[in-house]
Image (cartoon, helix red, strand yellow):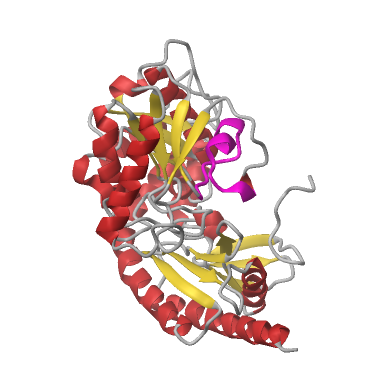
Amino acid sequence: MPDWLALYYRDPLEITHGEGRHVWDADGNRYLDFFGGILTTMTAHALPEVTKAVSEQAGRIIHSSTLYLNRPMVDLAERIAALSGIPDARVFFTTSGTEANDAALLLATAYRRSNQILAMRNSYHGRSFSTVGITGNSSWSPTTLSPLQTLYLHGGIRTRGPFAELSDAEFIAACVADLEDMLAQVQHGSVAALIAEPVQGVGGFTAPPDGLFAAFRDVLQRQGILWISDEVQTGWGRTGEHFWGWQAHGASGPPDMLTFAKGIGNGMSIGGVVARAEVMNSLDANSISTFGGSPVTMAAGLANLTYLLEHDLQGNARRVGGLLIERLRAVAAGLPVVREVRGRGLMIGLELTDIDGAPSAHAAGLALEYARENGLLIGKGGREGHSLRVAPPLSLSVAEAEEGAALLEDALRRVQADMEKERRP
């Protein structure tokens, strides 16, 4: 294994099996899972409907590639196209969010005949050469080489940066002015697309005020610039209020493209791009995906999406997530180490600081370890690695939310005590 492979915990964790919202490690320890394999186990571990669909499809045929049709791929494409909100939509399946964003960038640059891309500061879009090149978070961008010219915009972080003290309306106006100024510095009409996460995932679950990307779209449309909504982490109802993250910014219409992955497969490797037909069909060369659209993963995606819709997991994310975030805000009110609790639905971030109020990766690392000791798995992120990421499966119960909040509260109190002890002379 490479040295640069990121592993959580001082003593790395081997997960052997899971059920519902819980997983077990190789030593038999049981954990309440509040991260779901980076927001990928969307409904539940070992969901019977998904495991049955995988088993039955594997018994028929496991692989064929996109050179051939298979019924699960066509059925899932039709359902996603209908749910996307994009008119005359076409769907191309990949195996990951990285590959989905890579495909979207290929489509945008081919359609617009330009290699210029707008992206957000603090963003993350994947680990391929092209997606690293547009990632605005230096912690996840190991090279400055790129086939694309990327221009970074303000707006991804509401409570830090030069516009933090402005009202929401003033914040949006300032970010739009920044966009217009940026476009004035490039050749007119030469930018291919804006790619943006409605809620920045690796960036620490930060988000702009609702409506920012709608205001951006008004500017972009005047020059024919495409809008790609990176829904790899925000899609499928996780934010509770909306099925897609872009819908919080939908006043000027849907995006030209959206990318998805993670949760739809409930652990199976699925990604994809939805685009209006004019954009999707703009490639003038052959293209396929060897593993995208695999019959087994498509069967899993269909079963998982059906379960999510039939059990209103979006509504559950809104209700239980609302309770969880309020519980965590009450905890944070008495802990200076927690600067902010933010998010919506079951996508919640906690920003940790040192005693002086500076972002603290050390505090976040301690919280991760203490939570594990308590039997709770969470994630971390943020530009300095200083934010905790809470994103349980969308079937989380109220009792499990209360249990997880209590476990995290204990971990944060231990972090607060440690930080105060370290500060004493």
Percent from the top left, x then y, of residue 205?
A: 46, 59
Q: Nearer the viewer, residue 118 or 255?
A: 118
Percent from the top left, x then y, of residue 22?
A: 55, 68
Above or below 113: residue 409: below
Q: Which residue is pictured at 71% across the width and 65% down the height?
A: 9
Judge whether residue 371 can be spotted in this image.
yes
Q: Which residue is pictured at 41% across the width and 30% down the height?
A: 185
Percent from the top left, x then y, of residue 77?
A: 35, 33
Judge whether residue 244 can be spotted in this image.
no
Q: Nearer the viewer, residue 381 or 213?
A: 213
Tell me if 370 is positioned left or right of 2 in this view. left
Q: Which residue is pictured at 42% across the width and 38% down the height?
A: 195
Tell me if 270 is positioned left or right of 225 in this view. right
Q: What stretch is highlighted in magenta?
A: 122-139
Residue 378, by quadrant, is: bottom right
Above or below 317: residue 214: above
Residue 346, by quadrant, is: bottom left
Percent from the top left, x then y, of residue 113?
A: 41, 16
Above or below 361: residue 73: above
Tell me if 344 is positioned left or right of 202 in this view. left
Q: Nearer the viewer, residue 185 or 64?
A: 185
Is 205 covered by the magenta stretch?
Answer: no
